[in-house]
Every structure is written in C-alpha cells, then in structure tokens.
Amino acid sequence: MLTYEPFVQRVDFAAMLAQGSAWVSYGILRGLGAVIGIDVHKNGTILGSGPFEVDVSPACSGAVPSMIYLSAVLAYPASLKAKALGAGLGLVMINGLNLIRVVALFLIGLFANRYFHETHVYIAQALVIAVAVATWLFWAGRFTHAPGR
C-alpha cells in the first residue's frame, strides 16, 4: 500500500501522514518557540528556524512502522474487537511517538546539529520500531487469548 505505484497514485498514505506530522509538529514547535524564543516556519513538509530546515518526508512519517504493526495485529488470531483495539492503540502510540521524534530531532538539529544525523538514523528510528514491537507484545499479551495463557 505504501509503494505499489497504482495504489500510491490514488491514495498516498505516507505522504498524507507526512503532511499531518509536519502540521502537528509545526504547531508544537511554534508553541515551544514562543516559550524559548525561536521563530519556526513551515513550507509544506519542511520545518525550519533560521538556516536550519528539516523535511518530514514520507519515510519519516511513521507510515512504515504503522503498516507493519497493523499487519501484525490483523494477522494475529484475535477477535475483531481485540484487533480494532490493537489497531487504535498502536496507531496512537506509533504516531504519537513519531511526533515527539520529529519535534526532538528538530530541536537537536537546531541546537546540537552535530548530533542530528546519528540521532536520526541510529536512535530515533530504532526507538519507533522498538515501541511498535513493545506495543504489539503488550496488546497480544493483554487483550487477546495469546497461546500459552
């Protein structure tokens, strides 16, 4: 769904999620900026302050971990009610964390730019994946009739 071209031409979930993430992150950063004295601007999915800018690209939107998580929830032998609860719980957790990730990476890039690349590539991405896995394990163990229970 995220990369199959005939589907993406009609409904580009990753791009829509990137737009939404950029918009919400911009709102958070403007609020923080008013408190700490920075001016934040937004142009599409690009967020910036002064010469520093980041692009909340579809790859950074949380779409891939969300789809992997949803696939795991939907494939697991659970009731429809449990799957709906798991889907909602996971999407809130993953995308909420992704918003925190975008805001934190923006601030790291603005104030400690030398750590931006490593934090983005090695820490932030792994954290989103780890939270997705932890959320699925929590859901599968708590809200389904997990094997061995």
Image: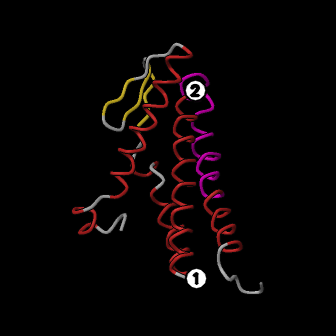
**Location of residue 23 with respect to 70 vertically, above or below:** above
Residue 115 located within the stretch drawn in magenta: yes
Question: Magenta: predominant secondary structure element?
Answer: helix
Residue at the spot of label 2: 113
Outermost residue on the right side: it is: 149
Dot 2: what SS?
helix
**Location of residue 79 with respect to 129 vertically, above or below:** below
User: Residue 94, located in which quarter of the rendered image?
Assistant: bottom right
**Which residue does the image show at 57% across and 37% down from the upper left?**
117
**Which residue does the image show at 56% across and 16% down from the upper left?**
36
CB-based contact (under 8 Å), mark 1 and mark 2: no
Q: Amino acid at mark 1?
A: Ala
What whole-number distance in Å separates the C-alpha atoms at marks 1 and 2? 45 Å
Outermost residue on the top side: it is: 37
**Location of residue 129 with respect to 28 vertically, above or below:** below
- Range of the magenta residues? 108-130
Residue at the spot of label 1: 78
Dot 1: what SS?
loop
Q: Position of residue 119 (x, y in %)?
A: 62, 39
